[in-house]
Amino acid sequence: MTYILSDIHGEYELFCRLMEKVRFSDGDLLICCGDMIEKGKHSVRLTQLLFSIKKTVLLAGNHEYAFLKYYWSLMRETSDYDLVLQKLQAYLAYDGALLDWDTVDRMEALPYYYETEEFICAHAGVPLDKERRILPLKQASVEQLVYDRTFKEPDVLPRGGKCVFFGHTPTINLGFEPKIKRYLREGARGDRVSDHYKIHLDTGAYHSGILGCFRVEDCREFYVGQSDL
Ligand SMILES: [Mn+2]
C-alpha cells in the first residue's frame, strides 16, 4: 500500500501512532510531502526515523529548504566543519544534538517533487499556466514548489488527469476541519486518486494535534489525535 502525508513538523509520537494505526510494514511505500522538521520538538528524531523506513519518497518542504539555505551559507563562510555541524544542531534546537552529517547529507539530497502516471506530490503545490494546466515540473523553481500559497486556494483546480497532493498550509487556515481536504472532479465518487483534482494533506499536526494520511489504493484517510476523530 502507498500512504501519503505532509507537514509532520517534528511530531514524532503522532507519526509513530499513525504508522501503527495503518499497520505500516516493509512492503508499504510512504510518501512525505515535506516539512518534517521544526515547530514540533523532534525534528531530527523524526527525520532519522523517516530515513530508516525501507520504501519512502521524502520531499523537501520550505522548512527543509530554509535549513539547507542556512547550511549552504555556513559552508560559504567557513571550512570549520565541526563549527558548521554545531550551528546546524543549534538551528534544530530541541533535539538538534542528534543531528549528524549523514542526516544533513540525506536532507540535502531530498527531491522537491514526485510524479507518477497518476499523481504529483509537491510541498506547496505545482505551477499552473493561465489555463490552469500544470507546467513541466523540471522547469519549476524550488521557491514555487515549496512556498507558493496560491495553489491551496479552493478555486485553483489544475486541469489534466493528474491529481496533485500537497500540504504547506493547514486546512484549518482555510476554514476547513483539521482533516485532509479533497477536491473532487464533477460526478466523481472519490474512490480513485484520479477522481480528484487535488488533495490538501496538511492537518496542521503541530497546532491541531491531529495527523492524517491518505492511502492511494482505496483513497481512505487515517487519523491520529483528538480521539482519532
Ligand atoms: Mn510548509
Image (tube, helix red, strand yellow):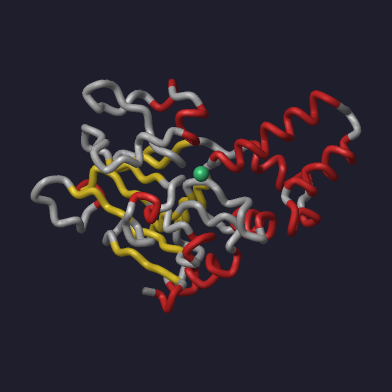
Residue 36 locus on image (x, y percent):
57, 51
Front-most of 157 and 32? 157
Left or right: 87, with 32 as reference point: right
Left or right: 11, with 220 as reference point: right
In this rendering, is residue 217 above or below 148? below
In this rendering, is residue 35 above or below 178? above
Residue 13 locus on image (x, y percent):
58, 69
Looking at the rendering, in which quadrant would you find the N terminus?
A: bottom left
| Residue at (35, 41) in percent of width and height | 152
In this rendering, is residue 86 above or below 137? below
Quadrant for residue 106, please give it.
top right
Residue 30 locus on image (x, y percent):
47, 55
| Residue at (54, 60) in percent of width and height | 206
| Residue at (38, 61) in percent of width and height | 178
In this rendering, is residue 198 above or below 46? above
Residue 23 locus on image (x, y percent):
45, 72
Q: Residue furthest left?
A: 187
Looking at the rendering, in which quadrant would you find the C terminus?
A: bottom left
| Residue at (40, 27) in percent of width and height | 137
Left or right: 116, with 79 as reference point: left
